[in-house]
Every structure is written in structure tokens, then in C-alpha cells.
Image (cartoon, rainbow, N blue to C red):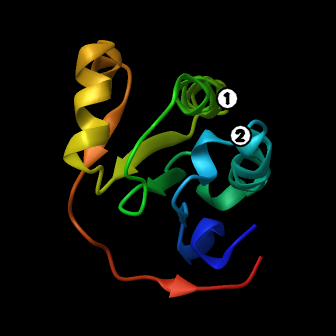
Amino acid sequence: MTNSDSSKVVAQGEWRTITLGGDQLNRFGAGREITVHLEELAFEETTREAAQLNLDLKKVEGITSAGLNELIGINSQARNRGIRLVLLDVQESVREIFNLTRLERMFEFDCSNRGSTEYSV
């Protein structure tokens, strides 16, 4: 995995933000890496009600069917755990894919940046 394909995880209270690298989302099994953070958020008693997982997609320039399937699975797991999943900084080319496939209704999008504290994974 190249440096541009690695992810960065940032925590701020009951939120986690994962910045995905270039083609990372399109790899088979990307969802398993993100599921670890869903599980952590779900088991934190103090934040269970307000837990939110942000996926920062600003480095993702394209998305394949495999990437869409990973996101659908992650979204389903998040909902089952009572965690709000928000897609951040989605590039126009990727947003068009969501619109064409009508998946934009399934996800929450946000383009604002948030201050937070980084921690290593």
C-alpha cells in the first residue's frame, strides 16, 4: 500500500473521521478496516447516543462498484449499531456516481471541515 492509499484516523469526542487514500475504498475488504472503528464507537457507553463516523473522501477521485458495495455495507453496519455515517468532501466525479446509481438518498453528505485531534491507529 502506498502512502497515498493509506488512511488517517482522527478523533473528536464521539466522532471519528477516517480520511481514505486514493484507491483505498475500491479495494476488496476496505469495509473490514472501517468496521473496527464502528465497533469502537458502538461500545463506548458515553457516546453511544451521539456516535458519528465520518469518511473523508477528498482524496478519492473515482469509485468502482466494489467501492460502492463497501460503502453500502459500512452504512448498513453503522445504522445497525446506531452510528451516524457521514461522507465528507466527496469530489464531483464521485458524487455523480452516487447520483447516477441513485445511492445519494442512502448516504448523508457534508462538505464542511471540522477541527479535531489526530491519533494513531
Which numbered marker is on residue 11?
Answer: none
Q: Is residue 120 above or below residue 38?
A: below
Q: Is residue 86 left or right of residue 2?
A: left
Closest to the camera, between mark 2 and mark 1, is: 2
Residue marked by disc 2: 31
> Where is residue 62, by image quadrant?
top left
Could you give the CA–CA distance between mark 2 and mark 1, rounded to whole angstroms? 10 Å
Q: Is residue 2 above or below residue 106?
A: below
The percent coordinates of residue 118 (x first, y second) are 57, 86
Q: What is the crowding at mark 1: few (fewer than 14 residues within 10 Å), some, or many (at least 20)?
A: some
- In this rendering, the answer to whether 75 lies above or below 1 is above
Disc 2 to disc 1: CB gap under 8 Å: yes
First in sequence, mark 2 or 1: give its number.
2
Q: Residue at the location (37% across, 51% down)?
A: 61
Q: Which residue is mark 1?
A: 77
Q: Could you tell me the amino acid type at mark 2? A: Gly
Q: Quadrant of the C terminus?
A: bottom right
